[in-house]
Image: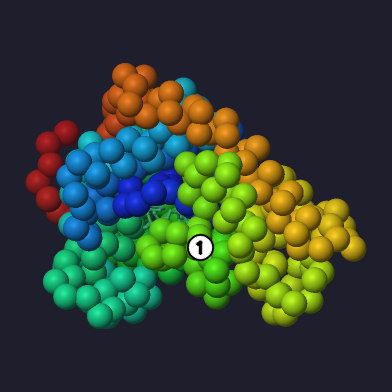
Amino acid sequence: KKRILSGIKPSGDLNIGGYLGALSQFVKYQHEYESFFFVPDLHAITVAQDPKELNQRSREIAAFYVAAGIDPDKSAIFLQSQVSAHAELGWIMETQAHFGELNRMTQFKEKSDGKEGVSSALFTYPALMASDILLYQATHVPVGEDQTQHLELTRDLANRFNTRFGKTFTVPEAIVQDIGARVMGLDDPHKKMSKSNPNKASYILMLDEPSVIRKKFSRAVTDSDGQVRYDWEEKPAVSNLIEIYSVFAGETTAAVEKRFEGQGYGAFKKELAEVVIAKLEPIQQRFHEVVNSPELDEILKRGAQKASEEAGRTLRAAQKAMGFVTFN
Ligand code: TYM
């Protein structure tokens, strides 16, 4: 049985990188796989969060799931903090992860670099992420490229646990798309598109208005060659824009090149903005309908119930395998 688990952290405003690398994949795969989509709020607090903002952003990520087209009748949509098995298995997996392994995680290095008062949870975070996935016996995990190292660690931990204590966890595989798995900043094609970039023109937010989207794309860096050609070596900035166009329009990169053959960047960027706006407008509309609605509360409650049953089963199996005293 094929099963997916994935999630997007509620730690800032969602940009189109998260949509391309993750959310649009969730929507696509929900029909093919039994799916669990969660809001990793426990992960968000590895760095300081304002309580009000965490609360609102958690709802927002869940609302984006629904607004983008995830069907809550088919897939479980839930908040991580409402399924206590995550924290419990998280602790267990910390006992399986080696210090040296965690110390090699490039995301930890990037996020802690030069900072004071880095939380110990930021360091052990990948063990919790492994638990998120293993609790649901997920076979596949759709993620952007920056999460592949964490997925490798998850596989190692699953194998290690299974070898020591007997087969308990499914060893999951990452699904990383060829196109859109690493969306770069509009100001610099060598830096990931990220909301932590102080330059607001470097990213497009899911809730940006049409006029803002047009302006940001019109200012996006390109190159002096003038041709809409997909070539990451020679033309990274243009290739990044082609990937964004490709995923939003549902066309191959070759089709995009052909469409804009002999046209300059001006025409390309204009149409790119329109393609993105056309896709985001209905998502934004639905988002505003659901984000603070009782409908969303119901979806999250139902999701947490389904998730708790599934996760509880795996947690008990893991506890039993390790030798904890368990009843029935
Ligand atoms: P997070 O919240 O940073 O990002 C959510 C997803 O979006 C992808 N992504 C991108 N893809 C392409 N281009 C970008 N610029 C871009 N920015 C973000 C990420 O690769 C990710 O797939 N640790 C995870 C959350 C998590 C999780 C899990 C994911 C916790 N437990 C279990 C999957 C399974 C994170 O911080 O992602």
Disc 1 target residue: 202
Residue positioned most to the right: 262
Q: Residue at x 36, y 38 (%)?
A: 60
Between 199 and 290, the one lying in front of the other is 199
Horizontal and vertical percent position of residue 14: 43, 48
Percent coordinates x, y for residue 42 in the rendering: 24, 50
The residue sitting at 58% across, 44% down in the picture is 211
- Please identify the quadrant where the C terminus is shown: top left
In the rendered image, is residue 135 in sight? no
Give the residue displayed 69% in from the left and 44% down from the top.
275
Q: Amino acid at mark 1?
A: Ser
- Residue shown at the point (44%, 65%) measured from the top left: 199
Colour approach in the figure: rainbow
Q: Which residue occupies the foreground of this view, 299 or 242?
A: 242
Image location (x, y in percent) of residue 304: 30, 31
Count of all numbered marks drawn on residues in the image = 1
- In the image, 130 versus 258, the foreground residue is 258
From the viewer's perspective, is residue 80 above or below residue 104? above
In this view, the residue in front, 52 or 164, is 52
Disc 1 element: helix
- The answer to whether residue 25 is left or right of residue 60 is right
Figure quadrant of residue 223: bottom right
